Image (cartoon, rainbow, N blue to C red):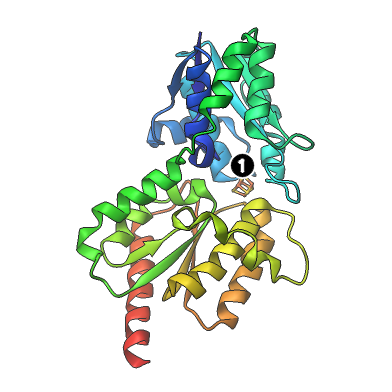
């Protein structure tokens, strides 16, 4: 049997774990290729206009995989930690896919995580047992997954760290904030990391050590309910105090519900700390020209500012 994994949404956190798990229990795995024009177009055709861009992209990846595999894994991620949720669109993802592509219903392998069981591996094990996998294979997979596994986001961050030789000497460091699919899907964000790495060093939440979690979001007056929102507050705190970044860029996609609130709170926090901040919105019609101009202007502003200080 061959299972398809869409290279979208939280694939950039959990993709390697998912791939390893299915391979250990004996399945062939096909991951969809990085997003391209055709994948985006086929997702946009299926989706209602109100959906955010990352979910439209996800639908395009599912459509790509449909004729190539027997099953398609749909990560139904409701909660991956005790105190916070992912996002309502993740909660409704299986329904969105079934509605957009009704003929694929028998092919979908929905892996539900949360609201009670938030351990990803346990949820995968449950699905595998339901599919008839033996207990011994499932046990073998758990044992293998005890080894720490880098996420695709971490691997991509490290690649840029090694390959941005031109800017290693740069004195500027920019903190890049956003949901992992906004940061690491190069087609969705018009290759922002590559563009940025030609003029400044940058740091993303996936480059930070594990212990950065919980500090920044813990300073908020009220508890945040969104995992990816909390993570951005934690990252801001760490990037300011430990990395000493010169400014922040936040990558947001059009029609993102949680970011309408979290983004505003985050901007206020950064402006209170008197650090330059640029928010870039992406949607399917985003053009490169405007992005390059804004990025260059922002980098120039930080350079002038640091010389003046
Ligand atoms: S968090 Fe925002 S961008 Fe991500 S799936 Fe939800 S609405 Fe879309």
Reply above or below: 177 against 121: below
Relative depth, front residue between 245 and 241: 241
Relative depth, front residue between 175 and 282: 175
Q: Residue at x 24, y 65 (%)?
A: 167
Q: Residue at x 73, y 60 (%)?
A: 224
Instruction: Give left or right: position of 130 versus 167.
Output: right
Instruction: Give left or right: position of 177 versus 117.
Output: left
Pick out the residue farthest to the bottom: 308
User: Is there any visible trace of residue 44 in the rendered image?
Assistant: no
Q: Position of residue 213 (x, y in %)?
A: 60, 58
Q: Is mark 1 within 8 Å of ligand 1?
A: no
Residue bearing the label numbered 1: 49
Q: Residue at x 56, y 61 (%)?
A: 212
Q: Secondary structure at mark 1?
A: loop
Give neighbour class at mark 1: few <14, some 14-19, many 20+ (Cα, 10 Å).
few
User: Is there any visible trace of residue 271 in the rendered image?
Assistant: yes
Reply above or below: 229 against 181: below
Q: Position of residue 286 (x, y in %)?
A: 44, 53
Q: Quadrant of residue 232?
A: bottom right
């Amino acid at each position: 049997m061959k299972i398809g994994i869409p290279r979208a949404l939280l694939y950039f956190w959990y993709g390697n774990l998912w791939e390893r798990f299915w391979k250990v229990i004996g399945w062939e795995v096909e991951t969809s290729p990085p997003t391209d024009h055709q994948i985006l177009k086929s997702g946009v055709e299926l989706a209602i206009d109100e959906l955010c861009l990352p979910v439209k992209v996800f639908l395009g990846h599912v459509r790509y995989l449909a004729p190539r595999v027997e099953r398609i894994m749909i990560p139904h991620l409701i909660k991956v930690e005790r105190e916070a949720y992912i996002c309502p669109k993740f909660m409704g993802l299986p329904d969105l896919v079934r509605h957009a592509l009704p003929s694929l219903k028998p092919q979908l392998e929905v892996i539900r995580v949360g609201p009670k069981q938030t351990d990803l591996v346990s949820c995968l094990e449950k699905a595998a047992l339901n599919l008839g996998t033996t207990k011994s294979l499932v046990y073998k997979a758990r044992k293998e997954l005890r080894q720490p596994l880098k996420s695709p986001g971490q691997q991509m961050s490290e690649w840029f760290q090694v390959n941005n030789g031109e800017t290693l000497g740069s004195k500027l460091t920019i903190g890049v904030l956003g949901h992992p699919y906004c940061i690491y899907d190069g087609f969705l964000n018009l290759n922002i990391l590559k563009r940025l790495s030609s003029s400044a060093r940058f740091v993303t939440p996936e480059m930070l050590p594990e212990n950065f979690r919980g500090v920044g979001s813990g300073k908020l007056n009220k508890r945040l309910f969104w995992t990816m929102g909390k993570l951005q507050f934690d990252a801001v705190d760490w990037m300011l105090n430990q990395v000493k970044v010169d400014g922040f860029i936040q990558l947001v996609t059009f029609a993102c519900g949680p970011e309408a609130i979290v983004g505003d709170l985050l901007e206020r926090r950064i402006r209170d700390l008197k650090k330059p901040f640029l928010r870039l919105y992406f949607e399917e019609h985003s053009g490169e020209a405007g992005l390059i101009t804004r990025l260059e202007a922002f980098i120039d502003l930080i350079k002038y500012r640091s010389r003046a200080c």
